[in-house]
Image: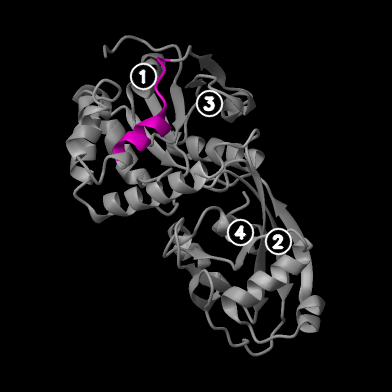
Amino acid sequence: MTSTAKPYDVSVYIGRFQIFHNGQLALLRRALQAAPLCIVVLGSAHQARTPKNPFTWQERAEMVRLALPEADRGRVQFLPVRDYYDQARWVSAVRQGVLQQRGAGVDPSFVLVGHFKDASSDYLQHFAGWALDAMELQGRIDASSLRDAYFGNARTSLEAALAALVSQVPASTVEFLRAWAALPYYQDMAHEWANLKQEKAQWAGSPYPPVFVTVDAVVHCAGQVLLIERGRAPGKGLFAVPGGFIESRETVYQSTLRELAEETGIGLQEDDLHGALKAVQVFDHPDRSQRGRVITHAHLFDLGARALPQVQAADDAAAARWFPVDKLAGIEDRFHDDHFHMLDFFFSLTSRA
């Protein structure tokens, strides 16, 4: 890049970059042409590793950085932003983070660089006051397909997996993925990917995309919340609140009580739980679950300051335990799907600024 004047002070480019590919590199180059400073917003930050989000935000920042010439690397700053599953709150977090990253001084001019892929790109229209440079689709490269190729060949040939990506990702990304495959996460994610693919294949013949209904029990007692450790894929080994699929002849409340009892063996009578029910909240963001479209009904039970009821893991749970609410923020990256954000909704674990 040359040192000629740029039309804006700061360009902003938002993405997940799981896996960073040539189409994204073209958009990043456009952003660097528009301003002397480019802030790359890394979405879906602070999550547990999954086949959809296998790389930490630091690993993704390195992938992006390595794809740039040395002269441009110093012009890029990275801003990790978590998924809030609440667009207004997420937009506010991006704005605030970008302004803090930019620092004090004369009011800068901003341009947001991106392209309208589908409904998931609607956020581009919600940054009032920033210019929008909406580029055409940069080739038919789909990050989901790239991850499928990378994890789908894990048990046969890594080189075959990488060969499938060579024409679609920067050479530096290929080398990053080759090195990352030596870490234990690669085989773990490949196993998760295979399980999810097998599960989705069961619904492949459906005339309509399936929509699943689930329930969750958020049980609070004496400043602690009841968590399970998942014993099966997806999310094996991750924390979650007790819950599962609704049964055809149950109400969501009946299913909640059943799942709570099956997974934790909590020593409470139904009347005790009924009296402790404080709220029911629906979580229905289209991207909240790896399984696909899953709508859950979370029931908040507050047992007050009584002694913690005994629990014993069973069914899908490998473990069940009480965990201090004020320590939950420290294990954000160990939760299944959006379960941390469900707890954030009820207990305000992250800033609302």
Q: Amino acid at mark 1?
A: Leu
Counting other residues with Cα less than 10 Å from the Cα at mark 4, is it few (<14), some (14-19), or many (20 or more)?
Answer: some
Q: Answer left or right for 175 relative to 47.
A: left
* Badge 2 or badge 1: first in the primary sequence: 1
Q: Which residues are magenta?
A: 138-150
* Badge 3 or badge 2: first in the primary sequence: 3
* Badge 3 or badge 4: first in the primary sequence: 3
Q: Main secondary structure of the magenta part?
A: helix
Q: Amino acid at mark 2?
A: Glu
* Badge 2 or badge 4: first in the primary sequence: 2
Label 3: element kind: loop
Magenta segment includes 106: no
- Mark 2 → mark 4, Cα distance in angstroms: 27 Å
Q: Nearer the viewer, mark 2 or mark 4?
A: 2
Q: Which mark is residue 247?
A: 2
Q: Nearer the viewer, mark 3 or mark 4?
A: 4
Q: Visible in this render: residue 333?
A: yes
Q: Amino acid at mark 4?
A: Asp
Q: Label 1, on which residue? A: 32
- Contact? badges 1 and 4 (CB < 8 Å): no
Residue 151 image-quadrant placement: top left
Q: Label 4, on which residue? A: 344
Q: Residue at x 49, y 48 (%)?
A: 199
Counting other residues with Cα less than 10 Å from the Cα at mark 1, is it few (<14), some (14-19), or many (20 or more)?
Answer: many
Q: Which mark is residue 74?
A: none
Q: Amino acid at mark 3?
A: Asp
Q: Which mark is residue 107?
A: 3
Residue 3 is situated, as x and y percent measured from the top left of the image, at 28, 13
